[in-house]
Amino acid sequence: QVQLVESGGGLVQPGGSLRLSCAASGFIFSSYAMGWYRQAPGKQREWVAYITSSSSRNYAESVKGRFTISRDNAKNMVHLQMNNLEPEDTAVYYCSKSTGSGYLRAQYWGQGTQVTVSP
């Protein structure tokens, strides 16, 4: 069965950095686009970034230039490097597997990892 396990969240000061990781199993990882979503308290879950099976990258406007998504097909891992973090980035971050290779339509989710940006 599909499993997605996130790690790397934590508490960081504004301007700091974190690197989130997602370990995937149960499917042919290299064949699917993978993405990251986040959900802040009281808000709807929103898309943050995704990477296609051919490693094309797409970002939400709110994180463009600060976040970088990458994938390691040999290790079945997807990462989200987050730099210059802002308090508005505080949320639970979820890894997702897409239904296809070249777009993000979330089919499966991880359990999430908390990111808190605070002085």
Image: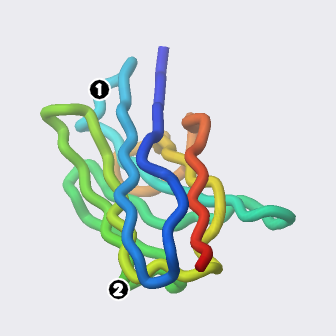
In the image, what residue type sits under mark 1? Answer: Ile
| Residue 38 point in image, percent of width and height | 61, 59
36 vs 95: above or below: below
Compare marks 2 and 1 and give the one earlier in the sequence.
Answer: 1
Viewer-closest of 113 and 109: 113
Residue 95 horizontal side relative to residue 57, left or right: right
> Which disc is residue 56 wearing?
none
| Residue 70 point in image, percent of width and height | 26, 57
Residue placed furthest toward the left: 74
Viewer-closest of 30 and 36: 36
Tell me the SS state at disc 1.
loop
In the image, what residue type sits under mark 2? Answer: Gly
Residue placed furthest toward the right: 42
81 vs 13: above or below: above
Residue occupying image coordinates x 46% and y 39%: 6
Residue placed furthest toward the front: 119
Residue 50 picture quarter: bottom left
Residue occupying image coordinates x 18% and y 38%: 73
Residue occupying image coordinates x 59% and y 79%: 119
Viewer-closest of 90 and 38: 90
Tell me the SS state at disc 2.
loop
Residue 32 horizontal side relative to residue 30, left or right: right
| Residue 106 point in image, percent of width and height | 56, 46
Residue 16 picture quarter: bottom left
> Which disc is residue 65 wearing?
2
Task: Write down the residue under mark 1.
Answer: 28
Label 2–label 1 contact, CB within 8 A: no
Task: Determine crowd level at label 1: few under 14, some 14-19, many 20+ residues with C-alpha closer than 10 A.
Answer: few
Task: Determine crowd level at label 2: few under 14, some 14-19, many 20+ residues with C-alpha closer than 10 A.
Answer: few
